[in-house]
RNA sequence: GCCACCAUAGCUCAGCUGGUAGAGCGACUGAUUUGUAAUCAGUUGGUCGCGGGUUCAAUUCCUGCUGGUGGCUCCA
């Protein structure tokens, strides 16, 4: 009896017998899909192609091109990898093996260390499994049946999962390999044509560092060879724009053993770029009604008691130093200082809000394994500010902040952002009631600006909830920079007040915020975003004047002097090298403009302009060139 | 901190199963006077991350430490 009603994307409706599978339907279709479909979606649920459809509905075949298709493809790939590992290491036990953004992994307890040298063997076994083109067969079991199967196979982690699941599990069988899995999976192993194991890492069972550590094998797989090649090529490209590598090549910064891990030296060129960023930042902040403050690097221990840092943040703080028999601590945050500036005199409701900004350098103990170039360091400068306002001003301030932040980031070419609202964590100060008010304020602000956001439960800071803005760089990676945190608690702990219109004392609300985040991380992100080719307004050297022979040296220096007069950062390359060599060097050091000066240019009193990446731009008068540079710097043109 | 891996000249890297090290680029010197991504020649450069052990002999094997890489946990 035909009782499965399928609605096709083109609107056609067709009835099928009970037991019909995606593959059956696929066979009736011609074209690309027939070869490329990896799963089928009925309404909102994704099913295996080989599985009898449990019910009818709107049908859509999924290919590798879709997110869901990739997940199915990579999930099955993880399964194949696990099977291969099992063949190489028969005692291996398996935990989780999900697809991720790019590829898949499987957490494995192999009984001994799997190392990179085992990759070849595992990949060969995977190739055998793929070649055998065995079907993935689904079965649904009772909890007891499943536990028995996995107990027999000594799959302790799987048994634990089943017990935690508490509902009848499904399993997938491929050859003699059985995995606990919700699915869906590819019809057979043969789909996984091109794959590669990528890396190996440690990962705690269930993500808890108290649990034993498993080995996580990462891999990637594609239906087409070109896709695998492109993926590997992209890895290479990402490597080329790695800020650690570019930082060295372009002489921007260094981190040295003698000083200590996570402590950054800004070299002249890097420091110059930082200077331009700070200059811009300060200008924008003055325009937005901020005032600047400054605070010391250390303070008495008791200050950090008052603020709650010693109770909630001490694992990130350095040990006290003794000064005149008193303990002092290096600051991990700037907020207590700003609170005390507020407290230094009586404040009136008329003067709120105060917006106090500081490029404040803080030090935090980060565990050695988390340090990473400029992205994660132990000493860094936050572009910090604290806003003290009345309750009736809060909403407006939050809205302003979101706009201010996105505007600032846009100037650097970051248009693509992800926004998160992080709520109360397990360890927190203050009352749940205050937390709710603060969270609500942030949520309202977000709603008002209309930006799309996600909730990040339990990810707030100890003193308040926060909005985090993550920016996407030019190759699509996401970086956390801006953070906006509403805090009802610190004002209470420091007992700060203002005098209201009613002549009574009132408690102000405090907003903590860093927009670029830290200058170190932001610089690292910028280096990778621009691949080291900083836009004109940031480039430490904007122009290299290149005389062709000694005969043009004098003229070249004259032009250079004119450029310097016009506040253009220019240098002359008057070494005894060929033009090609000098151009190559200017290109590799990513100088935005080159001016080639030969006899022709001297005679016509022009300059031959060459643009980084784009080559010869023809000749120009020096006046026109200077004007163009000025215009681009003024408008902060990115290209 | 945990798991795996790595550490050789300023940089990128060679150096098979132990017999105290090489290349390219860079830097320096000289020649060359050059028209849009590498002119030629010469010179310089290393306690083979640091300490201990095995050995007649250790850059190579073992071990401890330091630092780094990819992850996990944590985070600006």
Image (tube, coloured by chain):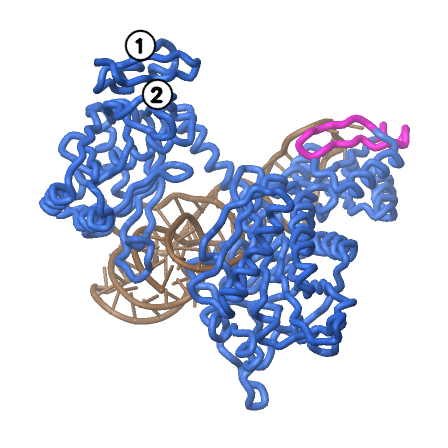
Chain colours: A blue, B brown
Tag nearer the camera, 1 or 2 = 1
Left or right: where A178 falls relative to A215 = left
Q: Residue at x 80, y 43 (%)?
A: A634
Residue A234, percent from left and from top? 48, 34
Q: Which mark is residue A28?
A: 1
Residue A543 is one of the magenta-drawn residues = no
Q: Residue at x 55, y 55 (%)?
A: A374
Q: Which mark is residue A172?
A: none
A490 or A362: which is nearer to us? Answer: A490
**Residue A257 appearing in the image:** no
A335 or A351: which is nearer to us? Answer: A351
Q: Residue at x 33, y 27 (%)?
A: A194
Q: Residue furthest front?
A: A502
Could you tell me which secondary element the residue under label 2 belongs to? strand
Mark 2 chain: A
Residue A377, percent from left and from top? 52, 60
Residue A609 is one of the magenta-drawn residues = yes
Whether the residues at callouts 1 and 2 have beta carbons within 8 Å, the answer is no
Residue stretch in magenta: A599-619
Q: Residue at x 13, y 48 (%)?
A: A154
**According to the image, label 2 marks what residue?**
A37
Residue A300, percent from left and from top? 58, 81
Residue A163, percent from left and from top? 20, 50
């Amino acid at each position: 009896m035909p009782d499965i009603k399928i609605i096709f994307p083109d609107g056609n409706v067709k009835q099928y017998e009970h037991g019909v599978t995606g593959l059956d339907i696929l066979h009736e279709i011609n074209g690309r899909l027939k070869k490329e479909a990896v799963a089928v979606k009925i309404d909102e649920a994704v099913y295996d192609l080989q599985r009898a459809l449990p019910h009818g509905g709107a049908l859509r075949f999924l290919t590798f091109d879709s997110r869901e298709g990739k997940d199915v493809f990579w999930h099955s790939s993880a399964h194949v990898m696990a099977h291969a590992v099992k063949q190489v290491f028969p005692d291996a036990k398996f935990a989780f093996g999900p697809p991720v953004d790019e590829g898949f992994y499987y957490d494995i307890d192999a009984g001994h260390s799997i190392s990179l040298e085992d990759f070849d063997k595992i990949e060969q076994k995977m190739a055998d499994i793929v070649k055998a083109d065995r079907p993935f067969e689904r079965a649904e079991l009772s909890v007891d049946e499943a536990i028995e199967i996995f107990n027999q196979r000594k799959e302790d982690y799987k048994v634990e999962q089943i017990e935690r699941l508490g509902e009848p599990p499904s399993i997938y069988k491929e050859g003699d390999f059985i995995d606990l899995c919700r699915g869906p999976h590819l019809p057979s192993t043969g789909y996984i044509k091109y794959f590669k194991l990528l890396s190996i890492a440690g990962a705690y069972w269930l993500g808890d560092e108290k649990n034993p550590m498993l080995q996580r094998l990462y891999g990637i797989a594609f239906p087409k060879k070109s896709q695998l090649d492109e993926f590997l090529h992209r890895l290479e490209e990402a490597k080329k724009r790695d800020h650690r590598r570019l930082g060295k090549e372009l002489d921007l910064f260094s981190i040295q053993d003698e000083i200590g891990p996570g402590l950054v030296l800004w070299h002249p060129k890097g420091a110059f770029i930082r200077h331009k960023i700070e200059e811009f930042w300060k200008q924008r902040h003055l325009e937005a009604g901020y005032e600047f403050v400054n605070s010391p690097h250390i303070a008495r221990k008791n200050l950090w008691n008052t603020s709650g840092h010693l109770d909630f943040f001490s694992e990130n703080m350095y040990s006290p130093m003794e000064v005149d028999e008193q303990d002092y601590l290096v600051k991990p945050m700037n907020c207590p200082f700003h609170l005390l500036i507020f407290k230094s005199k009586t404040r009136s409701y008329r003067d709120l809000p105060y917006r106090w900004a500081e490029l404040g350098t803080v030090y935090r103990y980060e565990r050695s394994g988390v340090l990473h170039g400029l992205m994660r360091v132990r000493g860094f400068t936050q572009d910090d500010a604290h806003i003290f306002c009345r309750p009736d001003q809060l909403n407006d301030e939050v809205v302003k902040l979101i706009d201010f932040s996105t505007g600032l980031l846009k100037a650097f070419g970051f248009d693509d952002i992800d926004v998160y609202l992080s709520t109360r964590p397990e360890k927190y100060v203050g009352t749940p009631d205050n937390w709710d008010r603060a969270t609500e304020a942030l949520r309202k602000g977000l709603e008002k600006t209309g930006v799309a956001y996600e909730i990040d439960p339990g990810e707030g800071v100890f003193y308040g909830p926060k909005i985090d803005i993550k920016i996407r760089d030019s190759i699509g990676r996401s970086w956390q920079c801006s953070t906006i945190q509403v805090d009802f608690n610190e004002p209470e702990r420091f007992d700060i007040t203002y005098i209201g219109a009613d002549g009574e004392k009132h408690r102000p609300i405090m907003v903590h915020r860093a927009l670029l985040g830290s200058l170190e991380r932001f610089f690292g992100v910028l280096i990778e975003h621009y691949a080291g080719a900083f836009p004109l307004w940031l480039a430490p050297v904007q122009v290299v004047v290149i005389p062709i022979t000694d005969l043009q040296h004098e003229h070249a220096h004259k032009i250079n002097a004119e450029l310097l007069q016009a506040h253009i950062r220019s240098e002359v390359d008057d070494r005894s090298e060929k033009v090609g060599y000098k151009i190559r060097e200017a290109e590799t050091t990513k100088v935005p403009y080159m001016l080639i000066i030969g006899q022709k240019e001297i005679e016509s009193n022009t300059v031959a302009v060459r643009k980084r990446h784009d080559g010869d731009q023809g000749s120009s008068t020096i006046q026109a060139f200077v004007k163009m540079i000025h215009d681009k710097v003024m408008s902060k043109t990115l290209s």
